[in-house]
Amino acid sequence: MADPVTFGARLRAFRERSGKTRPVLGGLVGRSAEWVKALENGKLLPPRLPMLLRLAEVLDIADLAALTGDQSLPVASVTRAGHPDVGRVAAAMQRTVVPAGDPTSAAVLRGLVDQAWRLWHRSTTERTAVAAVLPGLLDEARRSARRLTGLERRSASVELARVYHLAQLYIAHQPYPELVWLAADRAMLAAQDADDPAAIAAAAWYYAHVYRSSNQVDAAEQVLVDAGGLVDPAAGEEQLARWGQVQLGIALGHSKAGRAGRAWRAWDTAAEAAGRLGGTHPWLMFGSAACEAYSVTIATDLCRSGEAVQRADSTDYRALPSQTRRAGYLIEAARAHLLARGEVAAVHLLGRALRESTDTVRHHPFARTVAMELSRRPGTIGEDARELSLALGLTG
């Protein structure tokens, strides 16, 4: 471990590079601005591993050695668990030759992709469920998009983009960031090959997630703005849903960058579109319930602890028609409560999220690092966090 002064100087440099103030960084890891200042000034020793990992995740540091000056420890090796079937999915994604065989009609392919998305949203172990069909579906969609002609080929390309979106979700929060970028890029290329504005808008939503996770918030906004200009919210429910989700993605980028006014204006626009839509999009899951859930993320990213908790406590997560989305929301609610120093509530919410979807929680970096950190606490919080850690496969 580097001496405290060197560690503090590095911490400050990474914090300033990310554009975060001390209150914001402290809030995102459940500490005060004074605590961050004391670390940076060398008045506190570097924290233990769980907190180092949380700092690294928030500051987008890939290897703890960059922060501590000690031996290499890739952050993803601890905070991101690899799924047992990821090798088969990766092999299918990385295959350069179009699989042999006859193409599948666009209508049949659409039904298969719809079925895969239902598996993702309705299973408590969605990665395991989807991994069983994803390699074959990738081959089938790639073959059809290449070998069909005319309108059939364009329709197959739309479905290929949807398969890559699913692959991106499957690979997310695993120690293979290059595959996440590959899935996002190939989905956008397939959508553009289809020359389908709605498909491009959906691809932009998923591409923006990758940019934001790399702290490239301006790039995320640009891809969304470009795609939003291609769809007409007055041209029917499908385009309205795509346009509204683009606005929601813009709001998430502004909140990550700390631009509160612009974040809430974009969220208002998305929420208004969701209200006009009435229901929930069947696989994108855009709708009023999703907008309410993401408002918790926005308030938490903006470090508005009181507002974040109020929104978390007033949102009916059961209105989300997806196991994975409900689990994801509960993790965001836990983030909100931890921001407000509500450690008991945070552990409780993570346990509830685990009941909604084991895979979602097991692969989420926040859930993993918080479970590790709080498991060291005495009393009930530590006991519950240790049980959570066992469920996440973090301790023997």
Image: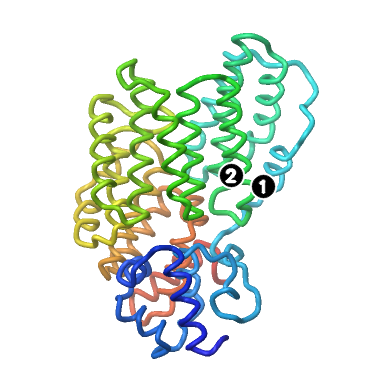
Side of 317 relative to 217 (left or right):
left
Residue at the disc numbered 2: 128
Most foreground residue, 395 or 13: 13
Q: Which residue sits at x=36%, y=41%?
A: 250
Q: Which residue sits at x=58%, y=33%?
A: 187
Q: Which residue sits at x=31%, y=66%?
A: 338
Label 2 crowd bin: few (<14), some (14–19), many (20+), radius 10 Å: some
Colour theme: rainbow
Question: What amino acid is found at the position of numbered circle 1 in the picture?
Answer: Asp
Side of 73 relative to 117 (left or right):
right
Q: Relative to residue 351, is residue 103 depicted above or below?
A: above
Quarter of the picture holding the N terminus: bottom right
Question: What amino acid is found at the position of numbered circle 2 in the picture?
Answer: Thr
Most foreground residue, 51 or 389: 51
x, y (%) of residue 117?
51, 31
Side of 277 relative to 203 (left or right):
left
Most foreground residue, 195 or 128: 195
Circles 1 and 2: CB atoms closer than 8 Å: yes
- Please give the label number shown on residue 85: 1
Q: Which residue sits at x=63%, y=35%?
A: 134
Side of 345 relative to 95 (left or right):
left
Give the secondary structure at mark 1.
Answer: loop
- Please give the label number shown on residue 144: none
Q: Relative to residue 5, is residue 107 depicted above or below?
A: above
Give the secondary structure at mark 2.
Answer: helix
Where, by quadrant of the figure, is residue 71 drawn? Answer: bottom right
Give the mark count.
2
